[in-house]
């Protein structure tokens, strides 16, 4: 061992020693030279290894990265093991994972200059009991995404807390077969965002004091488009009231403060059995992608959205999108808890069974501005589409969190 | 007497060639064990300034910017082996090859102080990238798998003094830029971008290739106005500095922003394209490139920044490349506003 702080403890399983690789635990303690010791441990790990982080604050100067499959990075708890990037000098994120079957658990990442933890092309990744936080609270100078899996098949985000992201706390992009559950997203611009992704369950999360609670978006000019089959259920989406602090130019900079659930340009999104309230613009908003674009492969319309079984508390009393105050005034001072921009016309009309008022702005044409809205109330219906199937993850992933 | 001298010269040449070629430890290139010391390979004779005669030096018309570091590039191929050139101009090297790249800065006295030497080794199972940092005595370099930082001072062309924390990439960061479909690949050696300091170096390099009957013409050189239009030079710069990640099979594939070989779709080049995951990299601007307006384009904003949450490219960017920013700015300025 060239580095005194890295102690490799060989945990030999005698029973299997003759047939399987020697899985070992590489322990890394906080302290001097943590950057090099931890990075070398992440590079030196072989499939099956556990990189175990000790208690304390790891003061890091550069992004960390893991490119070895089947490695678990495990701390002593998200309050005990802290990867502190306050002094970060380089790299676009705190930790980057680019290998498959990785488990990240029981540690915290604080104050990265860019994204918190990013995994790209990392299939079957598990994020468990992590905390990613910008400790100064909501600021435009915070990094964009807290937990950021992208271009991956099978993603599990479970029991994490993310606070302060200037874009999305938990962001899953251009991925397939996704579960985000039991997590807390607090004081981010977007609490949880599923973007350009297929087949996702977002459930049993708390999103509060974000600008928008849960977003399901699809954007043009990307390799994976046509986001579809997303279930948002049994979440608590309340008091998403933090003024939008995203740097302008980013799509989330246009999310109105006070948004509960927002669906943009996706197909088959089911929003059900959630508790929603204290969202000043709307509890649920369904819209098209209302920006100029000429990507022939892109569908800017939200289609197949179904909404049922949700509990609604107060919403819509202080709407924050352009023209919304005038619309609210015309409706007696407040917007109803659910609204649709009308993009795509009747064929794209969301199916709504919640017993609360729902509004169409009648902006069928994507280039129409809110000032030209022709609000009409949407009828609710008992005729719901067939439910989307539950997302099932590989057993190896569920076993991690059992 | 003359004959005898010639014979001696001949003999000396033979001996020296034999000597140099025997210096390269092919086992070190091929073995899965990564040597702790650069000297294990035999690429240098006790100093970064003394490359083995078995190495073929080359340069690039448009190089990757790395904090104004000077670079020295070498190719090693096993004796008797040769490279080929594919249809896109990319050089394909045989197993057992090594690409060797040293980084350093000139001191006030004009001496080039090499900080690190990066290796790309073509092993049977694929390419491997390794960073070696030269020891204080300059006689050998040590493998730094986890990367390193060094305080460096240098002067920009306008005389401005710079003091930066120079980053030696870790092994994963090497791969981040050298990645194609998750495998490590060479980036630089593309026929149309190759340059040589001397005609002899060019001839020696060409001699080791199995060259196709037609080869792509040299492409625009980013800083030579005679070599191409502003657009051609800007696209060459973008390909070399951005295209290794910003390609459909690269590290930045999720951005939808592509600067690899022949991308000409305006949205994929960033023209009128909104950012996807830029965060505060957007700088409050709407488009990656806003035609006619470099001052409102995210591309130039990120090139100018040295904040790790904003700066592009992500590595080797403790300083901004003023001349590159100027070229890209001129290109964007020349576009018709929308």
Image (spheres, rainbow, N blue to C red):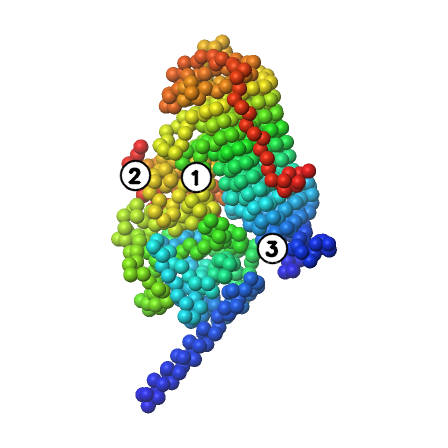
Q: Which mark is residue B335?
A: 2
Image quadrant occupied by the C terminus of chain B: top left
Q: CA distance from mark 2 to mark 1?
A: 26 Å
Residue closer to the observer: A308 or A168: A308
Q: Residue furthest bottom?
A: B1
Q: Residue at x 63, y 46 (%)?
A: A73
- Share a chain, discs 2 and 1? no
Note whether residue B48 is visible: yes
Residue closer to the observer: A8 or B81: B81
Q: Earlier in the sequence, mark 3 or mark 1?
A: 3
Q: Nearer the viewer, mark 3 or mark 1?
A: 1
> In the rendered image of this protein, does residue A162 appear above or below residue B118?
above
* Residue A39: percent from left, percent from top: 59, 51
Q: Residue furthest front?
A: A386
Disc 2 is placed on an element classified as loop
Q: CA distance from mark 3 to mark 2?
A: 48 Å
Q: Quadrant of residue B154?
A: bottom left
Instruction: Sort mark 3 into few (<14), some (14-19) or many (20+) by Cα contacts within 10 Å.
Output: some
Image quadrant occupied by the N terminus of chain B: bottom left
- Share a chain, discs 3 and 2? no
Note whether residue B117 is visible: no
Residue tagged 3: A44
State which chain disc 3 sits on. Answer: A
Q: Quadrant of residue A178?
A: top right
Q: Nearer the viewer, mark 2 or mark 1?
A: 1
Q: CA distance from mark 3 to mark 1?
A: 33 Å
> In the rendered image of this protein, does residue A268 appear above or below residue B277?
above
* Residue A171: percent from left, percent from top: 53, 35
- Share a chain, discs 3 and 1? yes
Q: Residue at x 59, y 47 (%)?
A: A60
State which chain disc 2 sits on. Answer: B
Residue tagged 1: A223
């Amino acid at each position: 061992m060239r580095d005194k702080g890295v102690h490799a403890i060989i945990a030999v399983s005698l029973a299997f020693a003759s047939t399987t690789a020697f899985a070992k635990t590489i322990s890394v303690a906080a302290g001097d030279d943590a950057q090099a010791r931890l990075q070398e441990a992440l590079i030196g790990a072989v499939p099956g290894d556990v990189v175990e982080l000790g208690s304390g604050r790891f003061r890091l100067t550069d992004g960390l990265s893991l490119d070895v499959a089947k490695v678990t990075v495990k701390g002593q708890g998200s309050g005990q093991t802290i990867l502190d990037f306050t002094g970060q000098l380089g790299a676009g994120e705190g930790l980057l994972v680019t290998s498959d079957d990785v488990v990240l658990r029981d540690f915290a990442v604080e104050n990265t200059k860019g994204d918190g933890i990013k995994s790209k092309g990392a299939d079957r990744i598990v994020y468990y009991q992590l905390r990613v936080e910008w400790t100064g609270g909501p600021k435009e100078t915070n990094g964009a995404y807290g937990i950021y899996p992208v271009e991956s098949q099978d993603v599990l985000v479970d029991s994490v807390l993310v606070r302060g992201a200037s874009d999305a706390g938990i962001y899953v992009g251009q991925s397939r077969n996704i579960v985000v559950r039991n997590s807390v997203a607090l004081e981010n611009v977007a609490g949880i965002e599923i973007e350009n992704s297929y087949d996702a369950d977002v459930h049993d999360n708390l999103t509060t004091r974000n600008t928008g609670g849960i977003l399901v978006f699809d954007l043009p000019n990307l390799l994976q488009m046509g986001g579809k089959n997303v279930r948002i259920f049994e979440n608590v989406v309340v008091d998403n009231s933090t003024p939008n602090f995203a740097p302008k130019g980013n799509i989330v900079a246009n999310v109105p403060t006070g948004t509960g659930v927002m669906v943009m340009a996706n197909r088959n999104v089911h929003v059900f059995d959630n508790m929603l309230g204290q969202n000043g613009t709307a509890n649920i908003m369904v819209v098209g992608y209302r920006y100029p674009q000429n990507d022939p492969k892109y569908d800017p319309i939200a289609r197949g959205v179904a909404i049922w079984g949700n509990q609604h508390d107060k919403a819509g009393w202080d709407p924050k999108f352009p023209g919304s105050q005038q619309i609210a005034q015309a409706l007696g001072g407040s917007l109803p808890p659910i609204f649709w921009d009308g993009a795509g016309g009747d064929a794209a009309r969301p199916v709504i069974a919640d017993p609360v008022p729902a509004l169409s702005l009648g902006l069928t044409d994507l280039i129409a501005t809110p000032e030209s809205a022709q609000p009409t109330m949407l009828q609710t219906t008992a005729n719901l589409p067939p439910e989307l199937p539950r997302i099932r993850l590989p057993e190896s992933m569920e076993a991690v969190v059992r | 007497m003359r004959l005898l001298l010639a014979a001696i010269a001949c003999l000396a040449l033979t001996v020296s060639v034999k000597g140099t070629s025997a210096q390269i430890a092919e086992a070190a290139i091929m073995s899965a064990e990564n040597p702790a010391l650069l000297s294990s390979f035999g690429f240098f004779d006790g100093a970064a300034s003394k490359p083995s005669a078995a190495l073929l030096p080359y340069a690039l018309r448009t190089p990757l910017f790395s904090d104004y570091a000077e670079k020295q590039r070498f190719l090693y191929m096993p004796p008797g082996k040769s490279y080929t050139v594919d249809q896109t101009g990319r050089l394909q090297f045989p197993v057992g090859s090594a690409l060797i790249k040293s980084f350093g800065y000139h001191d006030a006295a004009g001496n080039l102080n090499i900080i690190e030497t990066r290796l790309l080794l073509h092993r049977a199972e694929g390419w491997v990238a390794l960073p070696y940092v030269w020891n204080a005595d300059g006689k050998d370099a040590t493998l730094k798998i986890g990367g390193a930082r060094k305080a460096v001072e240098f002067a920009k062309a306008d005389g401005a003094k710079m003091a930066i924390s120079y980053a030696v990439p870790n092994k994963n960061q090497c791969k981040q830029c050298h990645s194609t479909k998750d495998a490590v690949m060479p980036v630089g050696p593309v026929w149309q971008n190759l340059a040589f300091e001397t005609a002899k170096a060019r001839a020696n390099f060409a001699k080791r290739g199995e060259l196709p009957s037609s080869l792509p013409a040299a492409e625009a050189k980013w800083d030579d106005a005679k070599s191409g239009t502003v657009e051609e030079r800007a696209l060459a710069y973008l390909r070399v500095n951005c295209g290794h990640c910003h390609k459909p099979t690269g590290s930045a594939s999720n951005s939808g922003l592509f600067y690899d070989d022949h991308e000409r779709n305006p949205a994929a080049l960033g023209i009128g394209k909104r950012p996807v995951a830029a965060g505060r990299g957007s700088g409050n601007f709407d488009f990656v490139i806003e035609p006619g307006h470099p001052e409102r384009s995210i591309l130039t904003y990120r090139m100018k920044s040295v904040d790790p949450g904003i700066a592009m490219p992500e590595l080797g960017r403790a300083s901004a490349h003023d001349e590159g920013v100027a070229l890209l700015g001129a290109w964007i300025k020349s576009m018709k506003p929308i």
